[in-house]
Amino acid sequence: MLTRRTQIGGARVGHSPLIRTTTWFCDTVTVAPWVHDASDYSTTNLFQVPNCDDSTTPDAQATIAATNFSTAIGNDNIQCDDGYEDFCNAASNALACLNGALSVAASESPFSLPGDDAGSQAQTYAGDALTAASTYVNSQEAETVVGDGLGFASDLYGAVGTIVSIANAYNSCG
């Protein structure tokens, strides 16, 4: 996937020949395999190209959320080990919440989610899910023929939606 930032410049504002505006727009072009200077490149990172609006990409959202979840559960477990039952319950509830949310995400995902323990190995799980999403999209892109772009767009949307669901699960349960 390649992102282009294109400038549409020099448009006149109103009837004034002196006032000009510059407008930027972003779009994404999928390319499989990547070709640059007559060399082929493969990528396993679906989100290698940043968002045009500089917002956090879904992969960064998932990674940050998994890290924060892991930290919160770790802190709860430390307090639990010190005998504070409320923290034991909080950790247990967070894990149950996460497993439920990820179960829903898995049921709607166009690709198989990883088998890692999403709670105790949050960063590994998020990383493996990102790799699975990228692998899935790359395989679908390679199979797409001209005129079937809608099918690929649906596949891409499903993969990105799954990653966002994983990030939301970690954020809401942690």
Image (cartoon, rainbow, N blue to C red):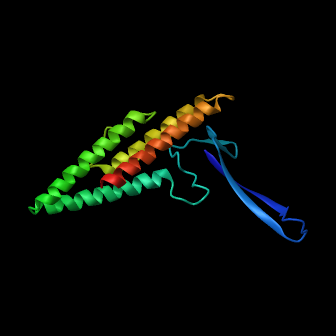
- Counting from the top left corner in percent of width and height, residue 74 is at 23, 59
All told, the count of numbered labels is 0
> Can the viewer see residue 118 in this picture?
no
In the foreground, 126 or 171:
171
- Counting from the top left corner in percent of width and height, residue 112 is at 40, 34
Q: Which residue occupies the extreme bottom position in the image?
A: 18
At 84% from the left edge and 61% from the top edge, which residue is drawn?
11
Q: Which residue occupies the extreme left position in the image?
A: 83
Question: For residue 86, which quarter of the picture?
Answer: bottom left
- Counting from the top left corner in percent of width and height, residue 37 is at 70, 46
At 20% from the left edge and 60% from the top edge, which residue is drawn?
76
At 35% from the left edge and 46% from the top edge, which residue is drawn?
125
Q: Which residue occupies the extreme front position in the image?
A: 14
Which quarter of the rendered picture does the C terminus lie within?
bottom left
> Can the viewer see residue 37 in this picture?
yes
- Counting from the top left corner in percent of width and height, residue 137 is at 53, 37
